[in-house]
Structure formats: structure tokens, C-alpha cells
Image: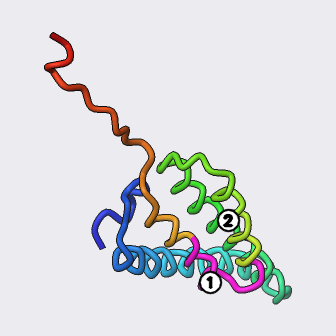
Amino acid sequence: MNNLTDFSLERNWKQAIGFYFAYLLLGFLIGALIGGITGIIDPYNLELPATIGEVAGTIYCLVLYFAIYVRKRLNSFLFIILGLVAAVINLFFGNIVSLIIVAFLTTREDKTETDITIDDSEIY
């Protein structure tokens, strides 16, 4: 469970599972906080906290996904579509399913490193 906030880290599947559970727990806590605040503001409307929690969960998934996407500098249209698919999945199934896609993204290679090496013998 090291480096959970390092979004550029290329994780193996065990690390991705740890990432999934950590951010799923964080998402539940954020949803509970937002739902609780909404329930305090309007205690007579029981549907409002659920609706706002659903929207907050979708925003949470999108922000987390694209934070990883940008930090890894993936530059792929397919991954952009996958992020939007994760948001749609979140609307129907919640963070439990959509964060699997986010955890998958953490296993992709970081594109910030370059493979260019300069040999000193070529300079002289």
C-alpha cells in the first residue's frame, strides 16, 4: 500500500488491487460525507442525498481516472473513451465497478520516461 498517491507509478496487479480498495474506501467516505451534509441541509427530501452522492461518485471517478491519465502522459484516444465509459458505468453500478477501470489504468506504463540514451563515446 505504498505510494498510493503516486499516480505515475506503474503498478503490478497486487498493487492495483490495493489501490482499488484504498480509493474505494476513500470514495465511500467522501460519498457518506456529501450525503450526510445534504441530509442535514434538506432532511425531508430523502432522494436528494442519493442523487447528489451518485453525481459526486461519478465526478470522483472521472477526476481520479484523468488525474492518472494526465500524470502518466498516456496520450491515447482509447484511454479517453475508457475514462468516459468508466463514468457511465459509475452511473449504473457505482464506484465498486468503475474503480476497477481506474485501477487497471494504474497498471499501464508511464510515458514520461524516454528511451533515449546518449553514449559518451559518440560525442568525441
Q: Residue at x 73, y 78 (%)?
A: 89
Q: Which residues are magenta?
A: 91-101
Q: Any mark on residue 82, and which?
A: 2
**Element type at mark 1:** helix
| Image quadrant where residue 33 sits | bottom right
Residue 79 placement (x, y as % from top left): 63, 58
Q: Residue at x 73, y 69 (%)?
A: 85
**Quarter the N terminus occupies:** bottom left
Residue 114 placement (x, y as % from top left): 37, 38
What amino acid type should be assigned to the residue bearing mark 2? Leu
| Image quadrant where residue 12 sits | bottom left
**Element type at mark 2:** helix
Q: Residue at x 50, y 72 (%)?
A: 103
Residue 24 placement (x, y as % from top left): 51, 79
In this view, the residue in front, 5 or 79, is: 79
Image height check: is 101 above or below 114? below
The residue where tag 1 is placed is 97
What amino acid type should be assigned to the residue bearing mark 1? Val
